[in-house]
Structure formats: structure tokens, C-alpha cells
Image (cartoon, rainbow, N blue to C red):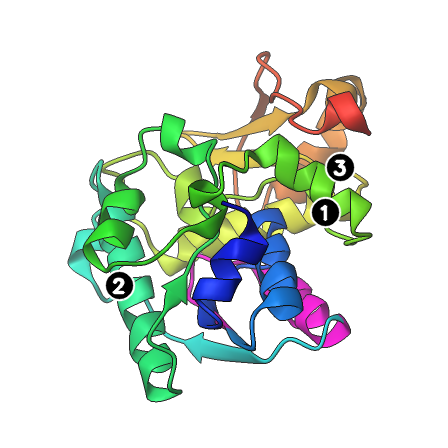
Amino acid sequence: MTLQDFFSKYHRVAIGFSGGVDSSYLAYTAKKYAKKVLAIYYKSEFQPAFELEDAKLFCHDYQIPLKILYESVLTNSHISSNPSNRCYYCKYQIFSAIQKEALSQGFSVLLDGTNSSDSQDDRPGIKALQELSILSPLQLCGLSKERIRRLSKEAGLPCWDKPAYACLATRIPTDTPITATLLDSVEFCENILFSMGFHDFRVRIRKEYALLQISSHEYEIAVEKLERIRQLFSPYFSDVRLDPTTRKECIESFL
């Protein structure tokens, strides 16, 4: 089955939209092949501000209707206590709200951007999607992350090489309570790294320091700038350490 086949069957769809590579390509093809589409973005404490701005810009440029839901996830103790299956509770809350909004707008079919590569991972959130009967066309059509990047590049989508950006909560170790203060600290420090020219990284919370993970092609630059990074992070973290294991560069092979 191709995406064109999928949208010939489901021609009126809502999409749980994040502004990332996968959901952007899904929204692009839905706009192309479906009769009516609505993108719905859920803005909580876990989504950094730049992701929302990217989502707005993409939908504006490709004339895709966008609805933004502003809600908190930290009021849910199953999420804020940060258990190992936090992602299940978070995904369930987010997509329940998106589904409710979609139905109110007349869309009975709700999609998400899970791709065929994701099925290989241990992702509790996928269970929530299954329980809510959310359809994942990219996965159903056998489209891997690499294939989606290639198709996005061929289509001229500006986000084709956008690094994967998991929610801010993934920076905090399991069973460490998640607070707005911690999330704000991570977002502020990651914005610093963006402003310094870094592209693919994570600032992870550790008990007494922040652990900086950098992709291989930017690692030496991070070593050179580490003291400056420590100075800029100092209002939030007393120490910053550079992880000697570099992040895998998922798009390096076809840049």
C-alpha cells in the first residue's frame, strides 16, 4: 500500500502533528492526496517553543489547517512522577485530547507519524496509540525514517534533514520527578547550544551535573567550547560534562 492508496480510502483525516520530519511528511502527503486534512498540535511543558514555531511555519507554507491545543501534562501524577512507562501515560493523555478535538471538528480518523523504523524500538507510547485506534500510515506503508527523509528531500520539504528531537522529558532520568523548573532549565540550555551553532545534541539531567551529548561531527567543537558552555549553563547547572560517546548521526549518510 502507498500513501496515495491510504488516502484514497481515508480521505478526511486529522493528524497529531509535531512539526518533525515524520508528521510533516505525513501532513504534506495528506494535503496532496486526501480531500480534507487538519493538523492538531498539542503544546505542553514537554514541547520546546521552537517546535511549535516550526509547526506553525510548515503548516502556513503548505496551507495545512492547524489547531493548537495548550494543556499541561504535569498535573497528571502518572506523568510527573516519571515512571519507566511515562511515555504511555503521556501519549495517552495527548492523543486523547487530540482525538476529542478531531471529533469535535468532524474528523473520525486520527493519524500519527509513527514510521516502520519505530516498531523496532521499545516504545510504551505505541501501546497508547493502539488503544486509542490511532492509525499510523507511514508504518502501514512500510516507510522507514531514512526513506521518509529521502522522500521529503525529493519533495523539497525544508525539514527533511531536521534532527530528531524527543520531548524535553526524555532528558530526565526515570523515577526523577519532572518539574517545570527542570524542563525550563533544559530548554534554556539547549537554546544556548542552538545559538552557538550546534544542531544535534541533548542536555541530560544527572544528579550533580548536566551531561552534554553531541553528534560525532560536532564533538571536537564542543570540546573546544566546553568552558564557555559551562559558563553559560552555570545559572542552571553547577557542572557540565561532555559524554565521550557521541550521538549517532542519523542523516549523515545522505547529506
Residue furthest top in the image: 244
SS category of the residue bearing label 3: loop
Q: Is residue 42 visible?
A: no
Which label sits on residue 93? 2
Between marks 1 and 3 in the image, the one whose residue lies nearer the viewer: 1
* Residue 54 belongs to the span the image colors magenta: yes
Q: Residue at x 80, y 42 (%)?
A: 196
**Secondary structure under the numbered disc 1 in the rendered image:** helix
**In contact (CB < 8 Å): disc 2 and disc 1:** no
- Residue at coordinates 30% horizontally, 44% vertically from top-left? 126
Q: In terms of depth relative to the viewer, which is nearer, 245 or 103?
A: 103
Q: Which residue type does callout 1 highlight?
A: Ser
- Residue 87 versus residue 243: which sits nearer the camera? 87
Q: Quadrant of the C terminus?
A: top right
Dot 2 or dot 1: first in sequence order is: 2
Task: Report the amino acid beneath label 3.
Answer: Phe
Please tell me whether mark 2 sits on a helix, a strand or a loop: helix
Q: Position of residue 188 (x, y in %)?
A: 60, 53
Q: Is residue 172 visible?
A: yes
Magenta segment, which residues?
A: 39-61
Disc on the earlier residue, 1 or 3 = 1
Check disc 3 and report the residue beneath it: 198
Decide: is 133 above or below 37. Answer: above
Say which residue appears at 44% left-offset and 42% top-offset. Answer: 139
- Image point (17%, 53%), residue name: 78
| Mark number displayed over residue 57 | none
Seen in the picture, residue 99 relative to 227 is either above or below; the reply is: below
